[in-house]
Every structure is written in C-alpha cells, then in structure tokens.
Amino acid sequence: MTTQTAPAQPTDADGTDASGSDAPPRPPASVLWLHRSIVALAVVTATMVASGLYLTFRYRPANRVDAPSLPDRSALVGIAQWLHTAGAYAFVVLVCVVVGSALVVAGRRGHNHGIILASGFGLFIVAIGFLLTGLQLPWQGFRWVVAGDAAFDGVFGFPRAVADVLVRDGAVTPARYETVAWIHIAGLPVFAVFAAWWLLGAIQASRRDGADPSV
C-alpha cells in the first residue's frame, strides 16, 4: 500500500511562498524604512509640539544658587526641556532618513527625484532653523532696570523692568528675544507644515506613477 504526498510549494530564498497565491508580496526594505521613519518623525513632532507648548508658558531655568527667595522649578519643566532638545536633534536626523528613503523608493519606481529633493531640502532647512532658534530660547536670568520680581515663567510677556534677557553666554533685549521666540513658535511651523505636505505629496505621487506600486 502506497501513500501520496502533496508536492512542496516552491519558495523563494527568504522562505516565502513563491506562488504568491495566498499572501501579498512583502514590500521591500526601503519601503518599510520609509514608512517607519515617517511614523517616527510624526511621533517626535508630536512630542516637540506638546513639550514646546508647555515650555512656552512654564519655562524657568534651574536655580544656580540655593536661596529661599528663588523657588525651585518644577521637575516637569526639566523633563519637557530635555524632551524638546532631544526631539530637535532627532527631528533633523529623521528628516534626513525620510528624504533618503524616499529617494531610494522613488528610484526603484522610476520616479523623478526633483520634487522630493526640493521639498526634502526645504524641510531640512526648517529643521535646522528650529534647532538654531531653539538654542537661543532657554534664558538664564535678567538684568533689571530696577529691582524686579525673579519669579517669572515662560518666554513671553517679560516684566517692563527687565532691561536684558541673559541667554547662554550673552544678553539680548526682551524685544529681540521675543522676536526669535515668535519665529521659533509661529513662523517656522508654517514652513514646516508646507514642506512636509509637499514632501508627502511627492512620495504619494511616486507611488501612483511608479510602474509597480508595490516597490
């Protein structure tokens, strides 16, 4: 008595079913990298927006002297500042990863790289702008015209008695400081949204126009 066995299904080198009848084709690694980097960029952006809004109204530098008249800042301020700073550097790196992955995918699909390069370069410039202006916002103290109140939180609406805002190793006028803050908080985000929308549109166009949308 003999038994018959079903012939083995042909498989690819990676062990997947070569017939492709049951499972859809697995997207290439470049497409997976692109999708994951876009998701990571969205998460980092949301973290920066949330921490940035909190710091806009609650920022206060860490006390360098221990005095009863200088209240300690909240631990949440320190956490938010760390997240915002780390997120700014991660944002620059992820923009480069997204643009690089998009160029690779567009090349596989035979799509023109021009729009992706232009929009990606614009988003990269905005990311650098966020980083440079953000580094000028953590103030360390004030120079007062007359004795003033040391308990001030945020980055807008300095008391009128403030003559200079101490930032890093220098001092700037409140008007100049708030100009940089407005550029960082309100100006650059407009260009970031435009550049990101343009880049995502270019990526989607490469998917539609490609000879094989699965690659």
Image: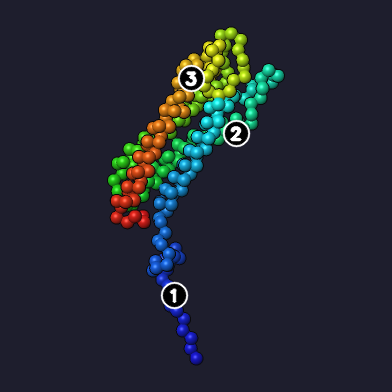
Residue 114 image-quadrant placement: top left
Work out how far the residue at label 1 is from the one at label 2, CA to CA, in angstroms: 57 Å
Please report contact status of discs 1 and 2: CB closer than 8 Å, yes or no.
Answer: no
Badge 1 amino acid:
Ala
N-terminal label among 1 and 2: 1
Question: Residue 92's x, y, as percent?
Answer: 45, 36
Q: Residue at x 36, y 55 (%)?
A: 215
N-terminal label among 3 and 2: 2
Where is mark 1, residue-wise? 8
Camera-side mark, 3 or 1: 3
Q: Residue at x 44, y 28 (%)?
A: 186
Q: Element under label 3?
A: helix
Work out how far the residue at label 3 is from the one at label 1, CA to CA, in angstroms: 71 Å
Question: Residue 79's x, y, as percent?
Answer: 60, 33
Asked whether residue 194 is in view, the answer is: yes
Residue 132 or residue 48, whichever sits in front: 48
Where is mark 2, residue-wise? 79
Q: Residue at x 50, y 42 (%)?
A: 43
Badge 3 amino acid:
Tyr
Badge 2 amino acid:
Ile
On screen, 194 above or below 214?
above
Q: Element under label 2?
A: helix
**Crowding at mark 2 (Cα within 10 Å: few <14, some 14-19, many 20+):** few
N-terminal label among 3 and 1: 1
Where is mark 3, residue-wise? 177
Question: Residue 52's x, y, as percent?
Answer: 52, 31
Q: Mark on residue 54?
A: none
Work out how far the residue at label 3 is from the one at label 2, CA to CA, in angstroms: 23 Å
On screen, 60 above or below 117?
above
Relative side of 70 to 43, left or right: right
